Image (tube, rainbow, N blue to C red):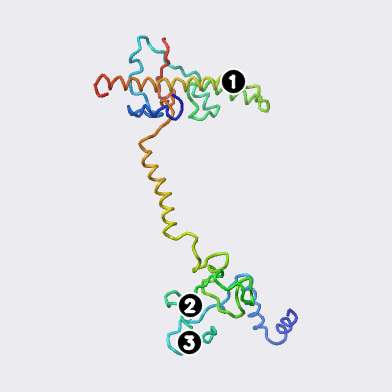
Amino acid sequence: MASTLLKKAIFSNPATVRKTLGIFCNATRNHWNYQYMPGPYPKTLEEREAAAKKYGMTIEEYQPYPESMGYGDYPKLPEIGEDSKDPHYPYDNPELKRNFNEPIHARMEIFGGDRYDPSMKRRFSLAHQWLWFFGVVGGSFALFFFLEDYKVGRPVTAKQYPWAGPHYLFEAK
Amino acid sequence: MGQMLGSYDARKVGLYMDDQPTFDPQAGFNYQRKSREMVAREADLISAKIPPKHRDYCAHYLLEYQSCRYKNMPLIYKCAHEKHAFLTCEKDDYELRMKEFERERRLRLREKRLVGAY
């Protein structure tokens, strides 16, 4: 590839080479380039059709995010965590349970197998979790406020310093 | 009584750890109490960089102990006697505070008894 690029750069099309190199540099160093950016929010039916076609979906499937979210024409995909996908399906990319050219969810970072799955089966119900949380924290606070009135300590008066004197011994002069 | 419950009973008269005595130091004694003497000079303590919280009535022992350590630095076991003297003084100081606490507690109880509130 390097020789082809070099040939292109020297002989035919230096501008394209610069652009291609820019994209490679961006993708490897910054993990983003302007070509990743979605198009503007589709307002008319034709724009919607065009956007659906761009993302390889039918017009019925295609549903953009609300315009205020700023995702442009990026489609709203179902929120399926990696753990909820069929582990026995022959994926093109079995590590991520993903097929080639399958559209990526706009918030795919959170739906990884090591992160979050919205349809996860909870080990304990939310009510159970809140009950334990407030039981422990509230119980600690209750104990704290109850014991405010039962302060104990060592049976000594304040330490005696010469500047706070005079102080006396328990013996005759 | 010992450690934790030591001041528990004293809360009946509103007395807690590290409170200041409120009665006249001579009250109830048929002799003049001896006052405590500060032996170390403030200037020496400042010069030796003894922190203010250690500038109590035992500071001269501490001063001696620290200067001994300074003189024999790697062989600080030679300062065992100075250290012992200092810690004994601190122990006596603590004992005095315990006595003051007990005196304060009994005086408060007595006052309550005289007033008839207890």
Disc marking residue A85: none
Q: Amino acid at mark 1?
A: Glu
Classed neighbour count for the residue bearing mark 3: other residues with Cα under 10 Å, few (<14), some (14–19), many (≥20)? some
Classed neighbour count for the residue bearing mark 2: other residues with Cα under 10 Å, few (<14), some (14–19), many (≥20)? some
Seen from the viewer's position, the closer of residues A133 and B78 is A133
Q: Vertical placement of B114 versus A79: above or below? A: above
Quadrant the N terminus of chain B occupies: top left
Rendering coords of residue A172 (x, y %)? 41, 10
Which residue does the image show at 26% across and 19% down from the upper left?
B114
Query: In this rendering, would B100 be left or right of A17?
Result: left
Q: Amino acid at mark 2?
A: Lys
Question: Which quarter of the figure has residue B69?
Answer: top right
Residue furthest out toward the right: A3
Task: Please tell me if label 2 and label 1 are on a single chain.
Answer: no
Residue furthest out toward the bottom: A46
Q: Which mark is first along the chain, 2 or 3?
A: 3
Check the residue under mark 2 and report the chain it is in: A
Q: CA distance from mark 3 to mark 2?
A: 13 Å
What kind of element bears circle 1? helix
Q: Which residue is mark 1?
A: B82
Q: Which residue is mark 2?
A: A76
Q: Vertical placement of B107 versus A45: above or below? A: above
